[in-house]
């Protein structure tokens, strides 16, 4: 997979609340499919489907234990997604700067108005 | 939309190379749909469909000019996605630390072996 296909797979995997919750659970430590299914009102096959999407994106791997086959978080693809988003940081920071400038203007304006009233 | 639905919409919008390319183009300045369609071997309706997905996620807005209806990038949802990813930073940094520790071990090991050979 090239970088673009990896980003497709990662963003697709992250575009679902159950899959994000599974990652949040795995952030606490590895877990079996049965453990992962517990907090969700979902059948094991439904959870397995979500795990496949996460696996395809390289976001989880399967541990050594042949019986439990525990799932483990793999954060590398998240780093790549993060790097992509960082490219746009100037844009969201710029909008804060505009807001901040507006706020400063309003603040500078307020006491003036008060003074004219007195 | 709550935070989870906003993340669903944002990650869905980002899970496509054409939509990411549209955002990259809009990062250079606002553009009309015709301008946006030019670099892609795609019909205008196909591009419009992608723009709808970006709009739904709040990643683009439509400018004032009633005739050109230029699209503009809105980075706020990217910031929220970035904040979500940042929650996992310790995981990708941890894997670098493990790699680094391994490298240090190998480095520390190498000269020792050389010395015993001499």
Image: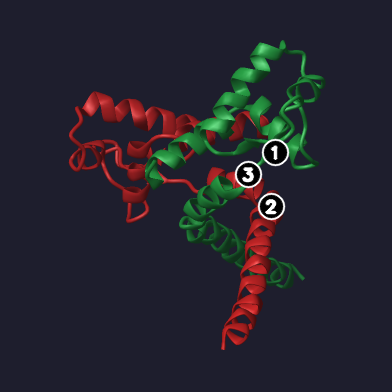
Chain colours: A red, B green
Q: Are marks 2 and 3 on the same chain?
A: no
Quadrant position of the C terminus of chain B in the picture: bottom right
Is residue A60 in view from this perspective?
no
**Residue A64: x, y in percent?**
35, 42
Residue B47 percent coordinates (x, y) = 67, 19
Q: Cβ–Cβ below 8 Å for labels 3 and 1? A: yes
- The chain letter under disc 1 is B
Relative to B45, is B57 above or below?
below
Q: Quadrant of residue B115?
A: bottom right
Q: CA distance from mark 2 to mark 3?
A: 8 Å
Q: Nearer the viewer, residue A11 or B98?
A: A11
* Residue drawn at (22%, 37%) of the image: A37
What's the residue at 60%, 18% (across, down)? B49
Residue B67: x and y in percent read: 75, 24
- The local crowd at label 3, few if under 14, some if 14 to 19, many if 20 or more residues have their Cα within 10 Å, is many
Residue A91 - label: 2
> The residue tagged with tag 1: helix, strand or loop?
strand
- Say which residue label 3 marks: B74
Could you tell me if residue B76 is visible in this image?
yes
Location of mark 1 (residue) = B72
- The number of numbered badges drawn on the structure is 3
């Amino acid at each position: 997979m090239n970088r673009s296909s990896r980003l497709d797979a990662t963003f697709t995997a992250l575009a679902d609340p159950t899959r994000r919750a599974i990652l949040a659970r795995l952030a606490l430590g590895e877990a079996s499919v049965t453990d992962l299914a517990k907090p969700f009102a979902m059948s094991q096959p439904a959870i397995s489907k979500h795990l496949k999407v996460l696996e395809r994106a390289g976001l989880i791997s399967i541990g050594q234990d042949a019986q439990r086959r525990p799932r483990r978080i793999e954060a590398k693809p998240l780093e790549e997604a993060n790097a992509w988003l960082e490219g746009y940081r100037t844009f969201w920071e710029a909008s804060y700067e505009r807001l901040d400038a507006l706020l400063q203007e309003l603040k500078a304006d307020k006491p003036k108005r008060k003074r004219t009233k007195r």
